[in-house]
């Protein structure tokens, strides 16, 4: 698990998006948020999400950066992410997180950046200049403002009637899309850089589940294969319950009407009246349709949900999570197929059971 610390001073919509994006996986999490504004919107957002927030006034940020580093120490921070942090980060902090601190700027750096170019001012300047394009830049933080290596950029087109407010809205949408991607890119890059990966980070990537394990996962049943010492070592860490994605339980079939005993008492031997033997088929057809509608599509819908989830996790670079979601999806598809077949063949038993009743 990689730990992120977010520095934020404002509304905190990027911070919230980052928390929510990574909460869906099990590789990255926001461990703590630090702010320099006592009433910043980000504080309430994080409280709602259960993320600890540490507040330090500007004076501490400017003159006692070591206190900031000490406050972060218990969280084992792998990456610092600036999301609307309106204060220059002092050199001791930048140096402690060299190559591990990102910022997002709402323009296409090198355009509209540097001192005094932040937030809404950027959008006002871009619109006033009649630009046809603007965008977002995620870059490494160095001691010079907005000048570190560019990690990722996203572009937006400006129609002639663009306003600073409408541009800001578009920019935010792009930010929500690319900031999590940039974070994954940097974390992965740091992992493969010899000597740069923090010692606390578990190095192995989870291995692919075997077909048997995939089945077990898909059907939500325990799988306990015989283990050798080697297999034991290769087993990926247990996913904490809070982040684990557990497929919903298989729908259980509704109980069939109780069948009559095979050796029925005398009453069964009594010849039936004509109208009793002549039962219409339509009620049984109705049973089948109800079964099909109730149980057939449920696994298919679950499979669809996991398929969408796979796509999203792939999009944000959480490949382990995507692989897991993909195998769960595969399991539910198989279940859907099997239930479809069962439904077709259940028609006969239901007819028999219903005719006995
Ligand atoms: C974002 O537009 C970001 O580019 C800039 O500050 C803004 C923060 O917005 N650095 P929010 O607080 O995340 O909503």
Image (cartoon, rainbow, N blue to C red):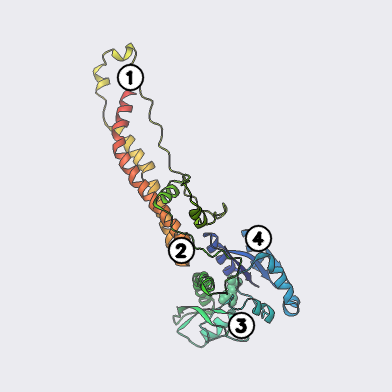
- Depth check, mark 4 against mark 3: the one in front is 3
Circles 2 and 3 in contact, beta carbons < 8 Å: no
- Pinpoint residue 149: horizontal percent, then vertical percent: 54, 82
Q: CA distance from mark 1 to mark 3?
A: 83 Å
Image point 31% across, 15% down: which residue? 268
Q: Residue at x 54, y 56 (%)?
A: 237
Confirm or deny contact between disc 1 and disc 2 (CB under 8 A).
no
Seen in the picture, residue 338 relative to 50 is either above or below; the reply is above
Left or right, residue 199 beside residue 74 = left
Q: Is residue 303 visible?
A: yes
Residue at numbered disc 3: 142
- The residue indicated by pointer 4 is 47
N-terminal of the two: label 1 or label 2? 1
Question: Does dot 3 land on a helix, a strand or a loop?
Answer: loop
Compare marks 1 and 4 and give the one earlier in the sequence.
4
Residue lying at the far bottom in this picture: please name it: 129
Question: Observer-nearest residue: 93 or 123?
Answer: 93
Residue beneath disc 1: 262
Vertical order, 181 against 222 (above or below): below
Mark nearer the viewer, 1 or 2: 2
Q: CA distance from mark 1 to mark 4?
A: 64 Å
Residue drawn at point x = 68 percent, y = 68 percent: 72
Q: Closer to the N terminus: mark 1 or mark 3?
A: 3
Label 1, label 2: how far apart the Cα atoms are: 56 Å
């Amino acid at each position: 698990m990689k730990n992120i610390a977010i520095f934020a001073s404002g509304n905190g919509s990027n911070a919230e998006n980052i928390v929510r994006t990574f909460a869906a996986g099990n590789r990255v999490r926001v461990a703590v948020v630090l702010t320099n504004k006592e009433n910043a919107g980000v504080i309430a957002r994080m409280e709602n999400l259960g993320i600890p927030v540490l507040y330090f006034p500007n004076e501490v940020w400017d003159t006692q950066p070591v206190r900031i580093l000490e406050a972060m120490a218990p969280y084992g921070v792998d990456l610092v992410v600036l999301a609307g942090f309106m204060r220059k980060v002092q050199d001791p902090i930048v140096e402690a997180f060299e190559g591990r601190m990102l910022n997002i700027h709402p323009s296409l750096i090198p355009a509209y950046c540097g001192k005094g170019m932040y937030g809404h001012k950027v959008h006002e300047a871009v619109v006033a200049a009649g630009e046809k394009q603007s965008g977002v830049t995620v870059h490494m933080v160095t001691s010079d403002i907005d000048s570190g290596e560019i990690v990722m950029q996203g572009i937006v087109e400006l129609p002639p009637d663009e306003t600073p407010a409408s541009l800001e809205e578009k920019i935010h949408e792009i930010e929500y899309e690319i900031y999590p991607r940039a974070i994954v890119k940097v974390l992965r890059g740091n992992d493969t850089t010899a000597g740069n990966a923090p010692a606390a980070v578990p190095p192995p990537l989870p291995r692919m589940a075997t077909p048997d394990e995939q089945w077990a996962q898909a059907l939500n049943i325990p799988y306990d294969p015989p283990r050798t010492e080697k297999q034991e070592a290769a087993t990926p860490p247990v996913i904490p319950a809070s982040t684990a994605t557990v497929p919903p339980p298989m729908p259980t079939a509704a109980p069939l009407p109780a069948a009559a005993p095979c050796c029925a008492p005398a009453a069964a031997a009594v010849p039936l009246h004509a109208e009793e033997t002549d039962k219409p088929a339509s009620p049984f057809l109705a049973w089948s349709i109800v079964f099909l509608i109730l149980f057939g599509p449920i696994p298919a819908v679950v499979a669809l949900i996991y398929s969408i989830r796979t796509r999203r996790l792939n999009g944000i670079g959480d490949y382990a999570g995507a692989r897991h979601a993909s195998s769960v999806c595969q399991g539910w598809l198989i279940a859907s197929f099997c239930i479809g077949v069962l439904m077709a063949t259940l028609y006969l038993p239901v007819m028999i059971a219903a005719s006995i009743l």
